[in-house]
Amino acid sequence: MLRQFAAYYKPHKKLFIADMFCALVVAVCDLFYPMIAKNIINDYVPNQRLNLLLIWAGALIGIYLVKAGMNYFIQYWGHMVGVRIQADMRRDMFLKLQKLPFSYFDENKTGTIMSRMVNDLMDISELAHHGPEDLFLSVILLLGSFIILCTINPLLTVIVYAALPFIVWFAIRMRRDMHDAFRWTREEIAEVNANVENSIAGIRVSRAYTARKREIEKFTVCNNNFQKARAAAYRVMARFFSGMDLMMDLLYVIVLVAGGIFYFRGIIDVGEFTVFLLYINMFLNPVKKLVQFFEQFQNGMSGFERFTQIMKENEEPETGKELSLPVLHGDIVFSHVDFQYRTKDGDESLVLKDLCLHIPQGKTVALVGPSGGGKTTLCHLIPRFYEINGGVISIDGHDIRSLTRDTLRKNIGMVAQDVFLFSGTVRENIAYGNLEASEEEIVAAAKRANIHDAIMQMENGYDTDIGERGVKLSGGQKQRISIARAFLKNPPILILDEATSALDNATEMLIQQSLEELSEGRTTVVVAHRLSTVKNADKIVVITDEGIKEQGTHEELLAQNGIYAQLYAYQFKNQ
């Protein structure tokens, strides 16, 4: 994992090396002060050498000015190293998410994914900057202090540094507890984010059902769990920092006692004793930085662990040998297709078994039947949103697994029951069907979807902001913008999954005419519960949880007096 983490420094190697060089200069500057102080105490002041006192005072000012410049570089450009690494990781995670199968998003909450992309990467950024810098400064200061102190009195130096292994041992021992505590904290804050995201997205439903109390209870549970996780993390940190502070305080006592004894016996003079006291303060600073490094390391690496979990997820499978075809004609064949959903816990749910179906090129095939039969799932299998478990789905004689996903999906247009619109303007959402479309083409698509007049009545026309997920629009308007998007894409294969479900009867009739026009000459798969919308389909397929039970034209299925006839009679019993 450390090797993976270190690889992100490579594109920013020059800036990172410059940051480390500045840290080295800062460490060397810090090492100068005690030695200059020793000379001032032992020589310049007792011997009244004012000129040397002023010269070295000026030298110290110069050293501190250099140090200030180096610290400015470290604080700005050093942080920029972390920010750029964070941006690279966020980019890689976003690109990875674009390649993950739909099943991943079925099993993982949006808020949890957002927490990994924002909170976790923020802590990784801090580790990327401060971690190597703190570790490097600590090592330089500890080694530099050791060498200089050995030139004064090796025995006293060994006594002081003998405490270092105990401090390191204690820090390593606490490492595992800190890692577990921080990981638990991250998992719980992700749950809080997921709960908040879900609650805000469904605010209208919770208000409509006066479920505010229920939402507060759910949030309180998540919030309390996070509080417990954070409390456990702080408990471990309290043990860690209080133990480290105790060790460093005892170290200070050791230096006072041992240095005092050495001074009484004439082994060191007052200047050297002062140097030891000054270097002990300098010794404590890198030790504190090491302590800080351990905290950042646990915090950052637990976040990086969660980052790598996403990066290790299996992407939509590709062999690299898939065909890239400009246009598909749309002759679709399902041959003995099996499909089952699989959860991340390993549970499996069989949806389709040994399904065989032919959807001829240019024809309209309607899928009807009770809920849970797999109609929408069947539609999702055509563009390979999910991978089948057995059998073959082919288009124009090509197994869809032998085609690139871009080839497949560029030739398929979808209008779903659950309309999703992006935050932005009306124009941007229609243009999603063809990002290179002209203004005239966008307007023409809107007119064919019977939404143009409604758009022109909006305050800013096509530049009207629709709010998050189209919250400022009515259900019918959102549905018609989605249909306009499909008109603009102009695909040879069209999938309409309850495309008119959110429309009133009058608007549905208008849209139905547009959809029939759009369907002309295209292979169209229609999922519908309103049988009135599929009466004119070339073929109607009745699907239940036992598979395909009936298929034929509207008249043929009525004549069979089977499931379709019963559904039709039920829907039109008042007529």
Image (cartoon, rainbow, N blue to C red):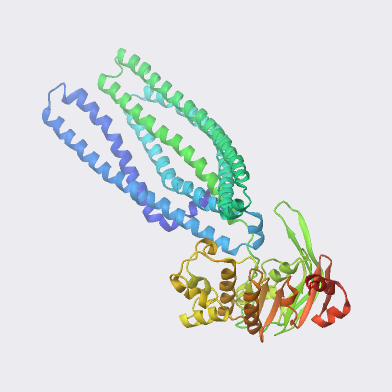
In the image, 85 versus 496, the foreground residue is 496
Q: Nearer the viewer, residue 205 or 373?
A: 205
Q: Position of residue 529 (x, y in %)?
A: 74, 70
The residue most toward the front is 574
Q: Nearer the viewer, residue 236 or 458?
A: 458
For the question of whether residue 487 can be seen, the reply is yes
Task: Tell me if residue 150 can be seen.
Answer: no
Residue extending furthest bottom?
521
Residue 144 placement, left or right of 216: left
Label count reads 0
Q: Nearer the viewer, residue 73 or 91?
A: 91
Residue drawn at x 42%, y 27% as measured from the top left:
161
Query: Dividing the image into 4 quarters, which one contains the C terminus?
Result: bottom right
Residue at image coords 16%, 23%: 45
Q: Which residue is located at x 24 percent, y 28 percent?
A: 37
Name which quarter of the figure residue 39 lies in: top left
- Residue 262: quarter of image: top left
Q: Is residue 444 left or right of residue 284?
A: right
Residue 57, image x, y percentages: 18, 33
Determine whether 16 is above or below 471 in the image.
above
Q: Position of residue 113 (x, y in %)?
A: 57, 53
The image quarter containing residue 354 is bottom right
